[in-house]
Amino acid sequence: MRKFTLLLWCFPIFMKKISVFNLHPSNEFEKMALEIFQFQAENNLVYKEFLGYLKIDIYSIKKIEEIPFLPIQFFKSHKVVSSEAAVQRIFLSSGTTGNEQSKHFVTDLSLYEESFTKGFEQFYGAIEDYTVLALLPSYLEREGSSLIYMVNDFIQKSKNEKSGFYLNNLEELVQNLVELDKNNEKVLLIGVSFALLDLVEKRKFQLKNTIVMETGGMKGRRKELIREDLHQVLKDGFGVEGIHSEYGMTELLSQSYSKGNGIFECPPWMKILTRDTEDALTVLPEGKSGGINVIDLANINSCSFIATQDLGKTYPNGTFEVIGRFDNSDIRGCNLMVMS
């Protein structure tokens, strides 16, 4: 038996001793990422076969920049798991007409809960201190949303009885928002872009104690706007200095946050790289625009290395910016692998 095989067998015990949520980002991240890569390369059958088609020797990978990232499309066509444990929840992407939904088979919901709780706390403090007003109609209208799962947990942890989802009761939302803000309560208003735009068209605000956070996407309800235009309309409508944003997706268990200007920060167990749009295996230097690759160490039981369909750029301080989407839904390199 190879020494490394024994390490893989012991990996769940190893993970309990060194939690991915207690990393020092300077040196522990890369070590943990490489451990998880080798674990998933052996135990995730989809990822293993993908690496095989690329003729990757997994034991030759010594830096995170050398790790091949699994195209996110495989979550639409395959069961991407690295664990034999029972599936506790299947999260589904929103999808659009004629498009297949992504499916994230989650075998340990406690990882997701710890990730989104500690991630939010890092940037905003305890969720218990906020009143959480959620305006997420397109997500509430379907099953399997990971965003709804997260926000519902936030609402349950909030100590204010006015926390909740607001779907068709916009008048109540307006009343509560104005009253809470006037009373100097800490408020988190989290909403999908088109719903926030609908709200400020009905009523103008001058909020002083409210974080307005958009989760992106018009979901076919409105014409897409560039971020600068969207945020300007929302800033004017809510009377706030900046619009916050959440960057997450069905296939991930972690989120990044922006407190304004579209610049996102990651929690210590998450990192963004950008890849060459013509060569999916080439990582670009900081400041260069390319496809966004996400390392999410919380995704231990599925895949922690995902090539998304988003375009962006990274900066020396570890922050990143999302600047658009691939025009072609098929990322280059995805067709390297044809599987049944």
Image (spheres, grey):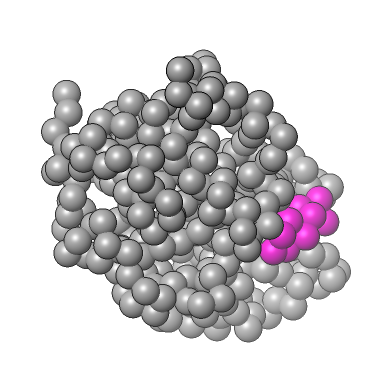
Residue drawn at x 81%, y 72% is: 182
Q: Is residue 280 visible?
A: yes
Residue 187 placement (x, y as % from top left): 74, 63
| Total numbered labels | 0
- Along the line of sight, the residue nearer the viewer: 135 or 338: 338
Q: Quadrant of residue 149?
A: top right
On screen, residue 185 above or below 91:
below
What is the magenta range? 120-130
Residue drawn at x 78%, y 47% is: 158
Query: Would residue 102 appear left or right of 122 to someone viewing this image?
Result: left
Question: Which quadrant holds the N terminus?
Answer: top left
- Along the line of sight, the residue nearer the viewer: 284 or 194: 284
Q: Is residue 299 visible?
A: no
Tell me, yes or no, whether the highlighted magenta stretch contains residue 72: no
Residue 306 placement (x, y as % from top left): 38, 48
Query: Would residue 4 appear left or right of 125 to someone viewing this image?
Result: left
